[in-house]
Amino acid sequence: MPVFYYYPLYAVCINALHSYLAASLYIRWYGLFNRADFISDSEWNRFIDFSEKLETPNIVINLHQIKFNYIKLRDAFPYAQVYYAVKSNPGDPVISLLDELGSNFDIASRYELDAVLAHGIHPDRISYGNTIKKARDIKYFYDKGVRMFATDSKDDLKNIAEQAPGSRIYVRVLIENTTSADWPLSRKFGCHPDMAYDLIVMARDLGLTPYGISFHVGSQQRDIGTWNDAIAKVKYLFSALEEEEEIRLTMINMGGGFPAHYIQAANDLHTYAAEITRYLHDDFGDEIPHIILEPGRSLVGDCGILTSEVVLVSRKNNTALQRWVYQDAGKFNGLIETMDESIKYPVISSKDGKDAKEGEVILAGPTCDSADIMYEDFKYKLPLSLKAGDKLYWLSAGAYTSTYASVAFNGFPPIKTYYME
Ligand SMILES: *Cc1c(COP(=O)(O)O)cnc(C)c1O
């Protein structure tokens, strides 16, 4: 009965493999990562010199790194036009830099519009990408010269036809499979492809210019295959509209979703580009429509470090193994994307490397709201010697942090941002 002999051996091997995998997962998930995986020693030293004397909490944005990321994106998608999603980091030096690099801008409100126009950026480099907007704000954009609008509903489309006659329209479709995105966006925005079809026909009938289809697969989308499904839906719409309505759409806006570098691994940008480009050719052959990308996180996420100061380290009972680490940044001043522990920033301390012994911590913010806890289920490890006054460095905190903060909850001012060349 050789089966009986070999089966246990086989089981032992599988067990060993499982333990090995569990151990590597442990390393990946429990904060035992290497700072060097996220930032080079020379950039780290430059950052420390720059930030040492700054009041905490603060965010330091590395403009040089944004330039690097922009060029990397352009090289990965040479056929695409970039519309930077301004909301991800609307800092003036960021806008200036991306203006110089030739980026266009995806804008979500009249306030963002004013901020971008103040740089002298021409309105034909701007798209009003928010599908939720007041009629008077559409008029405001139109009066300033913007002629490209996103929509996903009939009422909004009617408003655009009235307030921004003749403008180019693209319709955002819903992408349902967003469980693999760390920060999903799609449920709130977009419509079913059948409705997108109707909206494009309606846009033509209202005297607007049907331009294309957009989607957003969810921010920090780790499943590249999601773009495949989305592009297939777009292809179906392009073909149906051309065959049945003689409307020839010419643009696909593939949104954002490209990765920044957090604890949970994602493929590198070139892998995304290679796969997505292949999907486009699979569906459209050699005649790929005009492609727009709206990156936010992938351009600026890796380019910021948020520094906080430890306010208090405590235990909830005398024998508790876990420490609570309260520090001066939290959900209300920069770290809102830790909601549901969605985005897992690499966090290191000023004691990093100086004290080998680490223990599990619960990381919380400084306000009197119990929602102001960043990580409790997911256990970060920090040095056992950590104490008030030490600093914590939240790496890859350049996106959705600087303006994603309350103005004065509990009296705490919004987090300050500094820019390093
Ligand atoms: C927020 C947003 C983006 C940026 O998405 P990232 O995942 O940060 O790159 C792009 N397009 C639209 C319409 C958005 O709302």
Image: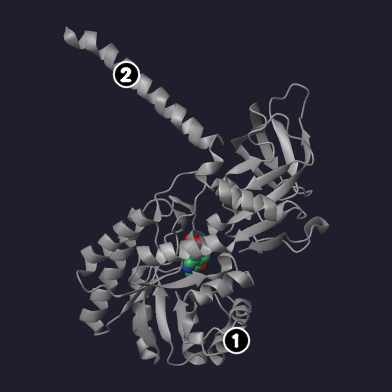
Q: Secondary structure at mark 2?
A: helix
- Tell whether 253 sits left or right of 119: left
In front of the other: 126 or 349: 349
Can you give x and y, in whole percent of width and height, for residue 28 in the image? 49, 36
- Tell whether 370 sits left or right of 80: right
**Label 1: how many residues lie within 10 Å, few (<14), some (14-19) or many (20+)?**
few
Up-down relation of residue 148 to residue 278 (above or below): below
Does mark 2 have its CB less than 8 Å from ligand 1? no
Amino acid carrying mark 1 in the image = Arg
Up-down relation of residue 65 to residue 342 (above or below): below
Can you give x and y, in whole percent of width and height, for residue 24 in the image? 44, 31
- Tell whether 159 sits left or right of 394: left
Placement of the C terminus among the 4 image quadrants: bottom right
Placement of the N terminus among the 4 image quadrants: top left
Residue 339 in sight here:
no
Q: Which residue is mark 2?
A: 13
Nearer to us of marks 1 and 2 is: 2
Residue 173 in sight here:
yes
In front of the other: 387 or 211: 387
Label annotation for residue 136: 1
Residue occupying the point 38% across, 25% down: 18
Residue occupying the point 39% across, 61% down: 175
Please identify the quarter of the rendering in which residue 74 is found: bottom left
**Label 2: how many residues lie within 10 Å, few (<14), some (14-19) or many (20+)?**
few
In front of the other: 60 or 297: 60
Mark 1 or mark 2: whose residue is earlier in sequence: 2
